[in-house]
Amino acid sequence: MASSLTRPTSSLSVDKCPSQYEANDSAVPLTEQQRNIALQALGETDARREESLRLLRQWIASHPHIRRCRTDALFLLRFLRARAFDQEAARLTLERYLTMRQVFRLWYENLDPADRYMRELVEDVRGCLPLGTDRAGRMVALVRVRSFDVTRFNCYHLGRFQHMLFEAFFDDVAVQIGGGVAIIDCEAATMGHFLCFKLADFRNFMDCLSHALPVRVQEVHIVRLPRIGQALGNLVLSFATDDLRRRIFFHSTMDDVLAYVDRDLLPVEYGGKVEPEAITNDLRQRLASQRDTLLLLDQMEIDTEPYAHFWRQTSEGDVEFGMEID
């Protein structure tokens, strides 16, 4: 698995107006392919990147509701690149992101790879495998739904696990520039898998994915969706934006996916060349090296009251605080 993030993160802080800003993107020089993608798809140049960072930092420093926030270059470039350097769109996404983390605490806080559930999901379950970058420079990940034991792991374990993986790759320039491709293999998925999440969970996750998570979703390939999940799949699609809906594809076999994804990236059980153990080892090392950075996210803070309208909340416990999930 290729990694574009190698610099130690011990110097990171959540001081929204530090005496010196961390220019950690300079430690990760772009490849020629990444420079071309950044220019053509995002309109990114060295001058525009530096000016956009300056303006975003200035805005954060004077923001009346943001109390604490990372301001290092790689963190802010998540939002600038996800919104093609549209300053207003990047700012709104950052506000939503910070609010989301506090409103949905069960999903987005304490993303600790040393937690026993998170460690088991990575090392034993292996339900989500980051496969690496394809020829187009996109990060490809495989989700094997059948691997998740829904009698042992509830929706909050799975939600936190998925977001922990997101956060572990958000600072990777390959992901920021090339975007991501997800393959969701639903073979042998059961009714329990589809009933694990409430409709409000799906609705809020799709809204977060479209408006609050700094990720460039290039394609989502849903494979071998059983009949019991098709109605729910259509309902979930109704929560997606038009742009995201156009990027979601349904396939009856994995062979159909090969028209979109390099076979060599896939695990050997799918006809590829990669051993799942190697993917797991790389992921374990990445998470261990970023543990402090993942936990630092919990120290960011925004006054959520002005943004209460971003997500609808019901009286049925769709959004709860301090719920015990162990």
Image (cartoon, rainbow, N blue to C red):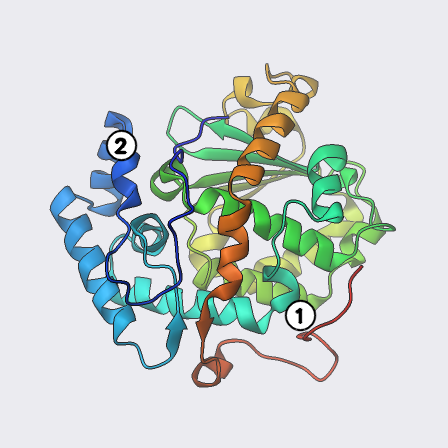
Residue 30, numbered circle: 2
- From the viewer's perspective, is the residue at label 1 or at label 2 nearer? 2
* Quarter placement of the C terminus: bottom right
Q: Residue furthest left?
A: 47
What residue type is disc 2 on?
Answer: Leu
Q: Position of residue 113 (x, y in %)?
A: 64, 45
**Total tally of numbered discs in the picture:** 2
Residue holding disc 1:
200
Taking the spot 74% from the left edge, 71% from the top edge, the residue there is 323
Q: Which amino acid type corresponds to the residue marked 1 in the rendered image?
A: Ala
- Please indicate whether residue 312 sits to the left or right of residue 317 in the image: left
Badge 1 crowding class, 10 Å Cα cut-off, few under 14, some 14 to 19, many 20 or more, is: some
Tell me if 160 is positioned left or right of 218 in this view. right
Q: Secondary structure at mark 1?
A: helix
Secondary structure found at label 2: loop
Q: Residue at x 77, y 54 (%)?
A: 194
- How many neighbours does mark 2 have within 10 angstroms: few (below 14), some (14-19), or many (20 or more)? some
Q: On the image, which quarter does residue 29 sit in?
A: top left
| Residue 143, position as x, y percentages in the image | 65, 38
Q: Dividing the picture into quarters, in which one does residue 253 lie?
A: top right
Residue 95 position, x and y percent, is: 40, 70
Q: Residue at x 69, y 67 (%)?
A: 199
Camera-nearest residue between 75 and 18: 18
Tell me which corner region of the image, top left, top right, bottom left or bottom right, holds residue 3.
Answer: top left
